Structures are given as structure tokens and as C-alpha cells.
Amino acid sequence: MLTGENGILTQSKKAKDETKEARKKEEDVIENYEQYIEGATNGATLIEVTGKETTNTTVYDALGNKVVIPAGFKVVNPGSNVEDGIVIEDVTNEETKGSQFVWIPVGENIKKKDGTVFDIILRRYVFNEDGTINEELSKTDPMEELRQYNLSDQSFYQEALKNSETKNVHAKDIEMFLEKVSKTGGYYIGRYEARTNNLRAEKTDDDKLTQLTVKSDDYVYAYVTQIQAANLSRNMYSSSNFESDLINSYAWMGAILFAQKCDDRENKEKPYSMQDSINKNELATKGTNNLDIEDIICNIYDMASNYIEWSTETFSNDDKPCSCVGGIYNNNAYTSKRYFNSETYTENDVSFRPIIYF
């Protein structure tokens, strides 16, 4: 009666353990609620995310804007709001530890500190010189032909669907990207241009490609073809919690629109969508430590400056099917401009930028 499996002492200890566990759960709930209140009061991201979580975590900034943190990442700037650029950092995966990404919100009524709201609708945008959206040229369908420069031009850009045959590497699944991001309410782009820990000073063989990172103290990943950039990006992470891929035209244009709507630069001469290189006359091989960096909008570096960047968008020319985007350090190319090149093209001023989505 006292000591058996169903004895008084055994059952008493079991009840004690269950009470202790229930009290612990109650304390955790109270602690999370206190963090929620503290975050809302002090302007911090509502629940601190440390990177120890094994699943994705949904949090909200002090204004109520949603942010999803991927498993294995921490929030770098928990006191910021979405308009500032929420930065996350990989703290779990040894090969990519320290890599940072910035949250790009998607949807309607995204709140700013001044009480105004804005929308980020995923489209393949073309911008006018004054930064307004060219509604005639902008597209919503991945396969719809987009002629950026001249409506009568027979060449065009489009995003290839999953099973399309193209010489360049297209997105893993552009339709899945659009569907998932619309439900999640956002995605991440690399805070910096793609990085690696070895300086790539010349054209190299495939077997010399090193691990992709997005770390400020690594070298910019140069001398890389569009095919190599796509494979490095999509293989950066292998996780059941999120996808990684080379940036597509929706993700690039959405990030530009976000940066333009939240651009707090003083005395800016151009809207960010039409901004040419802010950091001129020198190619920064590390991007953040050997120039006076000014191209930082919402914690995103060098979309208008430094290296031109590969995307998954496809150009209609059979010999030059790959699309590059963005500004570059030494000419008047601007942030939302597209370029085309062959799938084998590689040079010292061409890089890329990975994305993460759920």
C-alpha cells in the first residue's frame, strides 16, 4: 500500500512532480506575458528570440507589426521597429554562424512610428524617375513579359516557373515563394552582398567555391556566375523550417519599395528606387570596413552601390538569359535597374544576395 507502483508514497511523489511542472509552466506563461508588456512599453521586439528555438517564432514590434524569426537565429536589434529594419543573425549553424538578414514586410497597413502606414505588395516593379511606380510596365504575373526600357522592344524579362527550361538557374519555385510570403507577411534578404572568408581575386574553378556567408567581416563573393550564385544561395541552408534561395525580382523590388518608403536620409537627392551609387570611385571588397559607407537604408547595405547582383529573373535573349540588378560603384546604374548577361559571365564587380522565406 505504501511503496508499490500505485502506492501512497509513489502517487504522492507523482502528484508533487505534476504540481511542480504545472507551476513551472505557469511561471513561463507569466514571464512571456511580462516580456510582451515590457516590449510594448519600451519599444522592444515583444519576445526576445535567442536562436535556441527549434521552430520559427512569430513576434511583433512595439507598433504591432509582425516579424517571423527563423529557427536558429536571434534578433540583433530587439528595440527596433520594422521600419528601422529588423536584423536577425545565425547563431546555430557552424558554417554560416554570424550571417545576418533583414526582414522585408509584405502586406497592407504596415505601421510607422509617426503614425502613418504603408503597403508592400509583391510585384515586378518598374519605377519612374521621380520614384513613383510605373503602373503600365510593372507586372504581377511571373510569366508576364516585362519590358523595362521600351514597350516596343521585343526583348523582355520574366520569372521562370518551377519546371521551365532556362540556361540560367531560376527560382526554386517562384509561385511557392509568392504564396508562402503572402501568408507569412514577409521574407528576409541578406543584410550585405554575399560574403565568403576568402578574397576571390581572380576567376576560379567550381571546386574552389567556398562557403557562402552574409557577414560584415568577410569578403564580398565575387567572380561568380549566375548559376554558381543560385546554387550557393539555395544550398546555404537545409532546414525544414525555412527555404534559402538566390534573390528573385519580386524580393529585390519589394526590398527597394520598403527601403524607399522608410528612407530617413537627410538631404537625399533621389528616391531610393532611382538612386545610383552613393559610395563611388572604389570597389569595396569587404563592403563595410574600407569605405565611408553611406548606402545603408533600413539596415540593408549597398543595394544602390558597390557590386552589381545576380537575380533569378530571366532575360529573353538566348545568349544572355541572366538578369542582374542594382547599382554599382562606378557608374550611373540605379537600384531598380535590370541588366542582362550570359550564364557563364563572371567578373570582379558582380556578386549576389541570398534570401530566406517560410
Image (spheres, helix red, strand yellow):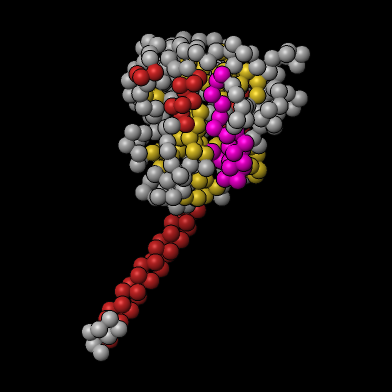
In-image side of 190 versus 208 (left or right): right
In this view, 178 is above or below 13? above
Residue 170: image quadrant is: top right
- Give residue 109's position: percent from left, percent from top: 65, 44
Residue lying furthest left in this view?
A: 3
Q: Residue at x 41, y 68 (%)?
A: 26
Q: Nearer the viewer, residue 307 or 198?
A: 198
Residue 203: image quadrant is: top left
In this view, 66 is above or below 192? below
Q: Is residue 20 visible?
A: yes
Q: Quadrant of the N terminus?
A: bottom left
Magenta residue span: 167-187
Q: Nearer the viewer, residue 136 or 209?
A: 209
Q: Is residue 297 shown in magenta?
A: no
- Give residue 229's position: percent from left, percent from top: 47, 23
Q: Residue at x 55, y 47 (%)?
A: 66
Q: Residue at x 41, y 29 (%)?
A: 214
In-image side of 181 versus 284 (left or right): right
- Give residue 343's position: percent from left, percent from top: 53, 15
- Give residue 351's position: percent from left, percent from top: 46, 19
Q: Nearer the viewer, residue 335 or 111?
A: 335
Q: Is residue 266 visible?
A: no
